[in-house]
Every structure is written in C-alpha cells, then in structure tokens.
Image (cartoon, rainbow, N blue to C red):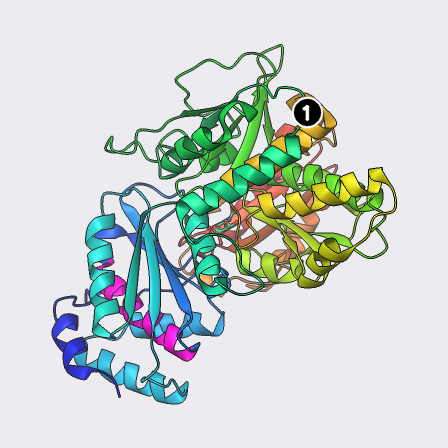
Amino acid sequence: SLPVDAIRSLADQHPKPSHIHFQYGTAGFRTKGEILDSVMFRVGILAGLRSKKLDGKTIGVMVTASHNPEPDNGVKLVDPRGEMLETSWEAHATALANAKNTDEFLAALDTFATTLKIDLSKPAKVVYARDTRPSGPALVAALEDGIAAIGAEGRDAGITTTPVLHYLVRAINTKGTKDEYGEDSEEGYLRKLSAAFKKLVAGKSVIPPLVVDCANGVGAKVANELAEYLGDKLRLIPVNTSTTTPGALNNACGADFVKTQQKLPSLPIELKPGQRACSLDGDADRLIYYYLDDRGQFHMLDGDKIAALSAAFIGELTKAAGLDSKIRVGIVQTAYANGGSTKYLSERLPVKCVPTGVKHLHHAAEKFDVGVYFEANGHGTVLFSPQSQEILSTYQPSTPAQSTALNHLINFAEVINQTVGDALSDMLMVETVLAHKSYSGEEWDSLYVDLPNRLVKVVVADRNVFKTEDAERRLINPPGIQAKIDDLVHRYEGGRAFVRPSGTEDVVRVYAEATVRTQADELAYRVAGLVY
Ligand code: NG1
Ligand code: ZN
C-alpha cells in the first residue's frame, strides 16, 4: 500500500498554490519556476510510481525550461528507453499536479495506483538532472522529497543537458544487456560520441574551428568537456558560457533566438565570412547553424537543413554499402518545415508530416528502418530500427568500398543520440557530413532555397477552442476561419499558412511562407488578423 504517513508529512511541506492550474504539455510542466514546488514534489512521486509500474526500471526526470526565459522552469519525465513519457500518463500527471491539498492528493494517488494496478511493493528507481537556472536547486530538493516519500531510490545526475539525461536513462536500463547503450555517466556519453566521431573523420582533412553559442546555459558545461575529448579533431570554440550571470540564459543568444529572430546571436567574437557557427538552446537539445557570406549577410541552417544534409548522406551510405534495398531511409517533419525543404526531400526520400511535439516525430520515425526527424527549430535526431542495427552488425560487404560505407553507417549510429534531439551529438553528425562532402556552410545551404517565412504569436481568450487536423495544417474550429485562410493563401505566390494552438505557451501560433519576404510577412499578419 501507499506510504501514506511519509507522503502526508512531506506533502504538507509542498502545498499547491491555490489559484493555479498546471498542465503536462508537450514539454512536461513548464511555467514560472517560483510556482513549481508542489509540482516537483508530486512528479517525484509519479516518477517512482511509473518505475514501479515498469517493474523497477529507471525513470528519468529533467528539470529545465529549455529556451524559455531564465525565471521559467519545468519538469518532464523520461521513460526507460530514454524516450518521452508515454502519452496516456500525461493526463495522470496533470490530474495529480492539480489535486487541491494533501488529502485530495493522497486520494488521487490511491485511485491512480488502484486503477493502473501498480504493484506498490515493487522497487523504484529515478535518475534526475537539472539545467543551470537559479530556481533549479530548490526545485530539485522538492523533487527529492517526492522520490523519498514514495520510497524510490534516487540518483542525482547533477547539472547536465536534457539529452545527457535521456542518454543516462537508456544506458542505465540497458546495462549488462545485449542492447547496452553506453556507459551510464556523462563521461561515458562524451567518450561514446567523441570516439565515433573520430572514427568517422579519420583521414579527412583538418576541419576548421567551430564557434558554439551555448546560450549561457548548461550546454556550455558539456560543450567545454566535449571540446577536451575532441581535441584537434574538431576544435570547438564555446562562447556565451556565462552560466552564473543573472539574466544571461537564452538572452539575445541561443538556438531559439537565432531561429525566431532569423539573425546572428550576440557573440563575443566576430565571424569571418564563410566561417560556420552554431547555437544550442538552454538545455542543449536544439541546434541551429549559420554563417555570414562575403557581403556580411546572415544565412541560417536550421533543423530542416540539418535533416536534408544528414538524410541525403545516410541514403548515400546505404547505397554505397549495398544496403539500399534492405534499409529504407525516411524523413519526418512537422508543418513548420520550410516548404523548400519538403520539396527537396520528398523528391528524394519518403517524407511524413506529423503534429508538433517530439513524441509524434519520434514515433513516426520509428516506422522507418532509418528515420530522420527534425523540427525546423533544430530539435531532432536519427533513429536506427533494431532490425537495421542488426543488419549493420551482421552484413558481409563484398567490396572494400562497401566495407568503408558500412563502417561509416555503424559509427554514424553511434555518434547520434538516438534517445532524443541532442544539439552536441547533432553537431558532430553535421560536422561528419560536412567533412565527408568537403562542404562549406554555403555549399550545404545551397542544397535548396528556404522560402521566406514568418512565425507570429497571437494571444487569444482561450487557445483550447482552436482545433486542427491534417497534422495541424488545417483548422477545424472555430468554424469558418480555415476557409478565410485558404482565401488569403491563394492570393500569395508560393503561399502557405496555418494556425495552431501552442502546446507550451498560452498563445496561438500563426505560420506563413511565400516566395517573397514581404509577402510572407504580410500573409502571416493577415492570417493573425483572422484569429485575433
Ligand atoms: P509549441 O509551443 O506547441 O508550438 C514549441 C515548439 C515545438 C516544440 C515544443 C517543445 C515551435 C513553433 N514550436 O511547441 O516545435 O519544440 O515547443 O519544446 O517551434
Ligand atoms: Zn530545449
């Protein structure tokens, strides 16, 4: 049965603020850090119960608000394979977080454990980490109270990136099995990635140094460590690494800033023409590249460009290895993918469009032998199915060229963090492809031309009335609006626009693209006018 007394006495120390409704959204709970104490405590208990439900497998908890402002914070659960929490548990998390007081919370827990048939006598293990936000330590303390209250064993992974935490969860749960993912430590992660990268670029000419904007967040710590492991193979220049300067996190820098502002972040060094640089977001699970051309003009290489670069390369490798009939490469995008990328990719490979949110992308990518998924904002990874991993490890190449390609594929699967989007791992993947193809940023950029686009937020009375279909590309409610959007879109050359409620902010997002910059802007603002 539930350790009611232990839970009660600790729960009383973490009361829920009365006027607030919490929601487990696409990125877990996310709001101002100062109101999250009760949520953290309850998530600790929930993680313990999830672990018990899954026979004592280790569950992950990440405390971060990613690219959001410094005063924000958040928390999300990670399932045993390093993936996002199973969808059906999101509603349970929301219900538990909103129980009004300790009595209601205990009653909700009891019903929950009974309905889900959770065997409370099972052991429970939780591994947790946080980013660099000032609200982090207190929130982790509340989380630890929850973990202790349910009698789970907690492991503190300290301050690290979201993708490292996901990696840890998978590594811990596969330890000693034939699917062992890697050593279950941050060093193990760094060793795995850097070793695979070094094999991939062995014999390639010297790679020019890479500026890495760390958004003044936790990525700075791991990027600095990675730089040591990589040494001369790839000289990283981590910048925006001020993790203790108040207000610096994600401020005028980082992947989200670059993507949404479509301009250079503030950098302490000047980029030379053609020199490539990249930005991580506040928890290092998003990556955006860019460079300035000879005229000083800014060029962004976003998640779509990363998908195009890497998918094409994997396709070439499978062909060169003689495996193209056995290993089918596919791409998963969302409605935010630039129309230019969708055109380029669908002429070459199968492309699937799914609703926003990593879990949708991840699950769709699992249906391919090798599934490449990226959100335009730079969150993404590549998944090798168990069958294709099996093929790679047993295949007998018949020529030296096939053998080389096979080894590259094997190392490619190692350099990629297959649990979740990982800025640093994706960066090594990009650098691998650039080195193999001897591409500059400009050559990579020229794979296809991005359509000018504009993303705007609209604050509405109730975003929940906005309902979509067709992977969020069409609005079905409020009635009548989609017809008006269609009308507008037809008037713009290369026009495309859609409206959807955000899953992480209390806003509705409007996206528009068109052949000409001013037209894309105009279309976005006119569509926004329809929902306002
Ligand atoms: P919402 O707020 O639902 O648009 C945002 C991003 C998603 C995803 C999630 C989770 C955009 C337009 N949306 O979702 O792609 O990354 O946050 O962090 O970038
Ligand atoms: Zn993030």
Q: Secondary structure at mark 1?
A: loop
Label 1: which residue? 204
Q: Is mark 1 within 8 Å of ligand 2?
A: no
**Front residue of 284 and 499:** 284
Number of disc labels: 1
Q: Specify whether 400 is left or right of 280.
A: right
- Residue 434 to residue 132: above or below: above
Residue visible at 38% across and 84% down? 118
- Residue 532 to residue 99: above or below: above
Q: Which corner quadrant of the image does residue 60 belong to?
A: bottom left
Name the dominant secondary structure of the magenta segment: helix
**Front residue of 496 and 255:** 255
**Front residue of 441 and 53:** 53
Q: Specify whether 306 is left or right of 137.
A: right
Give the x, y percent position of residue 530: 55, 50
Give the x, y percent position of residue 106: 23, 81
Q: Which corner quadrant of the image does residue 366 belong to?
A: bottom right
Residue visible at 28% across and 68% down? 153
Instruction: Inspect the magenta stretch and tell me whether residue 265 lies in it.
Output: no
Q: Specify whether 23 is left or right of 143.
A: right
What is the magenta range? 36-53
The residue carrying pointer 1 sits among few (fewer than 14), some (14 to 19) or many (20 or more) residues within 10 Å by Cα, namely some
Q: Is residue 461 visible?
A: yes
Give the x, y percent position of residue 332: 67, 53
Residue visible at 35% across and 83% down? 112
Residue visible at 40% across and 42% down? 67
The N terminus, quarter of image: bottom left
- Residue 526 to residue 119: above or below: above
Amino acid carrying label 1: it is Lys
Q: Is residue 26 visible?
A: no
Give the x, y percent position of residue 335: 63, 50
**Front residue of 343 and 63:** 63
